[in-house]
Amino acid sequence: MTTETLLEEAVQLIGDKAGGQSVPEPGRIDLTVEPARLLECVNALTTAHWGYLSAITGLDLGPQDGHLEALYHFCQKAAVLTLRVSLPRDGAVVPSVCGLIPSATLFERELMEMFGIVCEGTPDPRRLFLSDDWPQGVYPLRKDFIVPVPANRPEKGTAE
Amino acid sequence: MTGPHVEKFIVPIGPQHPALKEPAHFEFSVDGETVTSASVRFGYVHRGLEKGAENRNWAQALYLLERVCGICSHAHSTVYALGVERLAGVSAPPRAQAIRQILLELERIHSHMLWVGVAAHEAGYDTLFMYSWRDRETVMDILESFTGNRVNYSANVLGGVKYDLGPAQADSILSGLDYLEKRLHYYLNVVNNDESFLGRTRGVGTMTTEEAENLGAIGPVVRASGVHRDLRVDAPYLMYADFPVTMITATAGDLQARFVVRIQELFESTRNIRALVEHLPEGELSVRFPRKVRAGETVSRIEAPRGGLFYFIKSDGSENPFRVKVRTPSLRNFMSVIVGVVGHQLADVPMILAGIDPCFSCNDRTVIVHREGSDGSAPPSESDSRKDSSSWSKP
């Protein structure tokens, strides 16, 4: 089956549940999905055994834009289908997909601690990568998180 | 334990491991000897590389991302370079693509051989461990003489590669591969026929085709369960369309099948490298690459030794990446383990964990460099060995 027919098949499965549709590059289709309809879409894909959840990408479009995005990438052969869920920067909540894809728990834990996107109903909300003493409510992959420079780092040019 | 009041008993493993030389913390809930649930905690070596990439320009990020992994470093820099080049509308010359592919396959050989050793050690078969790590030095020497480094070869630049492959290099690669191929036959014989080894691998950690598919496992793990999933074949990149590899699969889905699949893949790699070395395209090694990359998003994927490596790269048209998302194959496979391990015996857990080849860094430099005027027969002086070894491996 060619990549194009695979993508067509996916669009047939969930196209009616999604909003906008775009083709960012050959072999890919992006579908915009409302948070409330995410599980419906994922369910349709997993029921039809279309691909596997390859990654969940968090994306911060910056404080000016005011939006975060969660991108659910499903891969099947060379085809990549991305469900784009746009969320407000304050109070970003998506339903957990772990009920349908149990192994997604690690992706969701990473998404939660790095971007402050709450995956509602996720079985294990503990941190995955960040240390236990990392401050609450600080999300390092958001654009307004500036990496602090250690106090003892020498100025540029003064080091030997 | 029976009766109405059954307590959950948790066996913590890690972060310091007797088995895996990688810091990760696992918690296995057990009922008697049977695992009932599993969870994991990473981050002991988290370095914030994704954030770091956003604070560097496109070229600097290449060197940063090469350091995501100490084993498949070239895979990371290649998947990033391919993605960024696609965004910029630049394509590396054919000779550069072939050299990238040669390095990727050499890296696969060293990675798989490292795993064969580690997994054999987990199985209590240290002879195979020592043999495979000794023989692995052949490919490490090839990589070191080719690029100057055992790991983090730094061979890629945006728009091509730095190192050319001359006739002398080609000869040393081909003779090294001849030796390795002989050894691979021996490994294959051991993993297929040695009774004590089979006792630890046959029927252990079995994942059926359906389970592997549903858990979304990738790489040799899923191919050992009979799922046809290999990006080199499914979505050929670099020169894999012209110099293809055959996808290796097995049906048993147990640890033994994972050994066989990985060793068979090494035969494919040696065949592929030979074809590339013998038909290396002529031409330039690199093309000019712009400072700024036009705005856009791309998904870049290649088949790293452990499975499909996934990068999502977004540019806002500036000199720095806007976002680089890295999803390593080990993370995807860890997920399949913590879900798939339920119902297995606790004693099999180390082997099941080792079976996915979780990635760990190998920073030591214990190779003895053949210096000019030395035929390699005399043992190195103490000062020599200190120069080339990390402190813990001092004789």
Image (cartoon, rainbow, N blue to C red):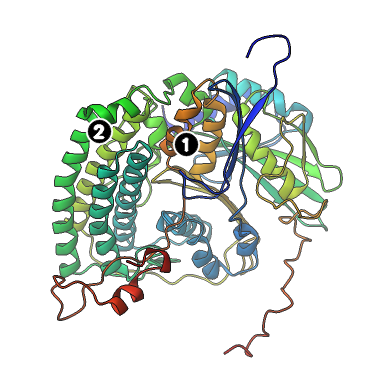
Indicate the position of residue A82 as horizontal and vertical percent values. 61, 38
Mark 2 closeness class: few <14, some 14–19, many ≥20 residues within 10 Å:
many
Work out which residue is located at the far top of the displayed protein and give it: B3
Task: Establish if B371 lies above or below B20.
Answer: below
Distance between the Cα atoms at labels 2 and 1? 18 Å
From this viewpoint, is residue B247 visible? Answer: no
Residue B322 percent coordinates (x, y): 65, 60
Tell me: A12 left or right of B91: right
Say which chain tag 1 marks: B
Disc 2 secondary structure class: helix
Check disc 1: other Cα within 10 Å, few if <14, some if 14-19, many if 20+: many
What amino acid type is highlighted by mark number 1? Leu
Name which of mark 2 and mark 1 comes first in the sequence. Answer: 2
- Residue at mark 2 shares a chain with residue at mark 1: yes
Q: Nearer the viewer, residue B163 or B115?
A: B115
Residue at position x 30%, y 47% from top?
B113
Residue B221 visible? The answer is yes
Which residue is disc 2 drawn over? B191
Q: Position of residue B367 (x, y in %)?
A: 29, 66
Q: Specify the quadrant of the image occupied by residue B169.
A: bottom left
Q: Is residue B39 left or right of residue A63?
A: left
Q: Mark 2 and mark 1 in contact? Answer it, CB < 8 Å.
A: no
Circle number at residue B353: 1
Where residue B54 appears, as percent x and y from the top left, is: 64, 63
Q: In this view of the protein, which residue sits in the foreground, A56 or B70?
A: B70
What's the residue at 75%, 65% (across, down)? A146
